[in-house]
Amino acid sequence: MVNNFLLLKDKTILFAEDDIISRNKIVEILSMIFSKVYQAEDGKEAYEIYEDEAPNIVLSDIKMPKKDGLSLIKQIRQNDYTTPILLMTSFAEKELLVDAANLSIDAYLVKPVSLENLTAALCKAIRRTDKDIGLIPLYDEFYYNFSTKELYNNGRIVPLGIKEQELLVLLINNRDKTVTKEEIEKKLWPIDPVSSSAIKKLILRLRNKIHQNIIISVRGIGYRLETRKTPR
């Protein structure tokens, strides 16, 4: 148990639960384990916190007002398949889990959840990110480190602007899939719309810092990151 606590002590968590008594009880436990606990009383508030704070892990109840747990997870998974997500359910809600089959849920916890089971599930989810997401190979000696949010070339940090960083993370989270121009605009400029030429210039700057051949243009649609490919 002590080792589990050490694994989580520098991580942040978002916990969504509409029942205030259950929420306060679990938040009290999570606060002893994590460096920061963000709490929400419904899925709508949870997604706003997720966007603002980018927690290391998400723990959500399945039934909540305004936006339920499944709707919350679907919205997160539109652009993010790396953040671990755990879903809490009751026995009566098990039939709803069919809808969650393709949402890459790290664990399903049946309430009431014991401290031992909760901690074990959280640690397993964090270990997945440390193992699979910590260092992402891009091309030759290029790697992106999600833990430090830095791009490396042959061990040296490649400086990135804020938008370059956001674009690279978006492409990595959807690597080998096409990200549309609309998705890029919505993620990087959620308030003020930008021209297609601004997106092209950003793509060009990022290409120049990584390699021209791994950010592929898909005519009329958007862009795709092809990792670990031989130059064409």
Image: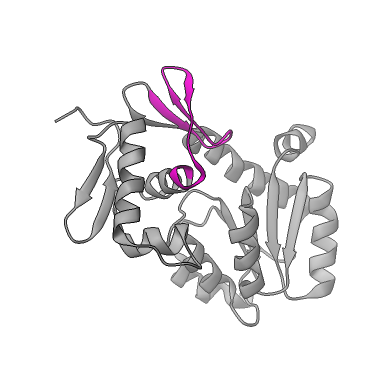
Residue 50: quarter of image? bottom right
Between 149 and 190, the residue placed more toward the observer is 190
Determine if residue 228 is in view.
Answer: yes
The residue positioned 23% from the left and 44% from the top of the image is 216
Q: Tell me, yes or no, whether the highlighted magenta stretch contains residue 74.
A: no
On the image, the x and y values in percent for residue 103 come to: 45, 61
For the image shown, how many numbered marks are present on the structure?
0
Residue at figure coordinates x 41%, y 17% from the top left: 154
Magenta-highlighted residues: 142-165
Q: Is residue 140 above or below residue 225?
A: above
What's the residue at 76%, 49% (across, down)?
36
Indicate how the structure is coloured in the image.
Answer: one colour
Instruction: Tell me residue 183's x, y (percent).
Output: 37, 62
Residue 156: say if magenta: yes
Residue 186, given in percent of the width and then of the height, sits at 43, 64
- Residue found 44% across the figure and 43% down from its top: 164
On the picture, is 6 further left or further right than 175? right
Q: Nearer the viewer, residue 162 or 182?
A: 162
* Residue 166 to residue 105: above or below: above
